Image (cartoon, helix red, strand yellow):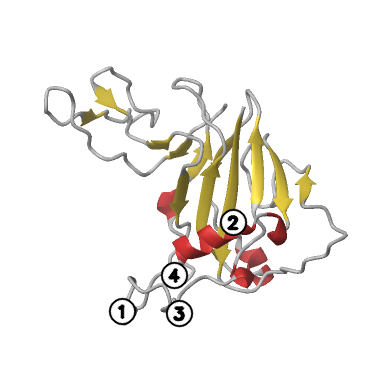
Amino acid sequence: SSSSSSSSSSTNNNNANNNDEQPKAVQITSPTFSSHSISRRTSTTWFCRYDGVPTLLAKARELLGTPTPTTDVNRNDTPNNNKVELDQMEEPQIVRYRTGEEFSWHYDEIPKAQLENGGQRLATLLVYLNELEEGRGGGTVFRDLMPPITIGEDGKKKKRSKRNSRTGNAAKSSSTIERQLTVRPKTGTALLFFPSYKDGTPDIRTLHKGEVA
C-alpha cells in the first residue's frame, strides 16, 4: 500500500481550535470530500489536528514562506513577513492507498460554491510516507505537465513519446519517456504544487491523479 500526508494553504481563515478531548485524527468515510467532484476516490483519509503534527506544519510554513526583497536570508533572526500563518492552512490529511485503490483525475481547487468556507486553495504539499517499486503504480500523475528532458547513457536527450490523437494516450517505448509528469512515491520526499494562482484563479494545468496502487 501507499500512504501520503498532505497540507494545503488557503487564502482565508480556517478553524484551528485545539481541544484536548478530541482525537489526534478523524477518519473521513466519504469517498469524496465535495459533491461537486466527479472523481473516483477509493483511498481512506484522516484529518489530523494541528497539534498532532507540529513538525509537518512548521516545515510546510517555512517551505511556503518567501523572503521579502529586503530580507537577509542568511540571518536567522530576520523575520519572514510573508510566511504562511497557521490560520491560512487546512487541517493536514493522512491518505492511505491499499492495493487496487486510487484517486482518479481531479483538481485541488476549491469549487466556487465552497469558497466562503476558507477561500481558494493556493498550494498543495504532499509528503510520501512510503514507496513502491517501479511498475506498482501509486504515483502522482499530472496529465498536462511534461517531465523534464533527461540524458541517456549515450549522452543524447531522450525523446518524449507522442500522444495518440484519438485516445489521448502516449505510446510506450523503451527508447522514450512518458509524456505525462509522474512523481513516484519515495519515503520522506515531498511534492509541492500550486492549484491556483496568487489571485485565486485556478491553474488548469494541475489536473492530476493518484495512480492505482
Residue 87 at what x, y percent from top left? 63, 71
Outermost top residue: 174
Q: Are marks 2 and 3 in contact (CB under 8 Å)?
A: no
**Residue neighbourhood size for the residue with mark 2, other residues' Cα within 10 Å, grouped as few (<14), some (14–19), many (≥20):** few
Residue type at tag 4: Lys
Which residue sits at x=72%, y=46%?
Answer: 46
Residue 69's mark?
1
Mark pair 3, 1: CA separation = 11 Å
Residue matched to label 4: 198
Q: Residue at x 38, y 32 (%)?
A: 168
Q: Secondary structure at mark 2?
A: helix
Residue carrying label 2: 55
Q: Tell which of 31 and 74 is nearer to you.
A: 74
For residue 42, side relative to residue 128 (left or right): right
Q: Work out whether mark 2 precedes mark 3 in sequence or the reverse, and give the earlier one.
A: 2
Q: Earlier in the sequence, mark 4 or mark 1?
A: 1
What mark, if any, has residue 189 been given in the picture?
none
